[in-house]
Amino acid sequence: MRIINLDEAEVRFEKCKPGSSCKWFVTVGVQKGDHYKLLLAIKLNKIPYCWFDLETEGAVGSSSLVKDEVLKNSDPGLVDVKPIHN
């Protein structure tokens, strides 16, 4: 596994319409300086899941505080869009 230092990272979760080649589409984009790159795109038929962990002295564990912090920094224009398909 390669570990890289970046300025920003973006993860998008897209629920696809019925009849698509997958049910979920996940992308990971990264930025260093002025350079943005779509690093990874994943097609899934199962619902993706996320882990939000906090490293403390000698342990790493699941944290709702980390989850809240990450989601607070998410899409500021987020609205509930009603699907046009079932």
Image (cartoon, rainbow, N blue to C red):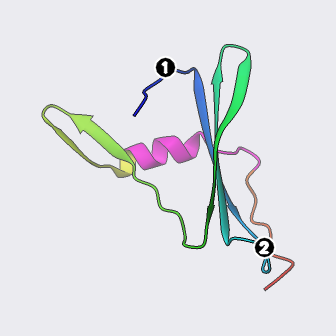
- At a point 51% along the width and 42% down the height, the residue shown is 70
Looking at the image, which residue is at 56% across and 43% down? 72
Q: Which of marks 2 and 1 is nearer the N terminus?
A: 1
Q: What stretch is highlighted in magenta?
A: 66-77
Q: What element carries label 1?
A: loop
Q: Specify whether 77 is left or right of 66.
A: right
Q: Quadrant of the C terminus?
A: bottom right
Characterize the local packing of mark 1: few (<14), some (14-19) or many (20 or more) Cα atoms within 10 angstroms. few
Question: Please, what secondary structure does the residue beneath circle 2 have?
Answer: loop
Residue position for label 1: 5
Q: Name the residue under label 2.
A: 20
* Residues at marks 2 and 1 touching, judged by CB atoms closer than 8 Å: no
Residue occupying the far front of the picture: 1
Residue 58, how many percent across, how many down? 12, 34
Query: Magenta stretch: residue 76 in it?
Result: yes
Q: On residue 54, which mark appears?
A: none
Residue at screen point 58% across, 20% down: 7
Vertical placement of residue 38 versus 31, above or below? below
Rendering coords of residue 10 (x, y %) = 62, 38
Q: Which residue lies furthest to the left in this view?
A: 58
Q: How crowded is mark 2: few (under 14 residues within 10 Å), some or many (20 or more)?
A: few
Identify which amino acid the numbered label 2 is placed on. Answer: Ser
Q: How many marks?
A: 2
Q: Which quadrant: the N terminus? A: top left
Question: Which residue is outermost to the bottom?
Answer: 86
In the depicted structure, whether residue 43 falls above or below residue 58: below
Residue 82 in the image: x percent, y percent? Answer: 80, 74
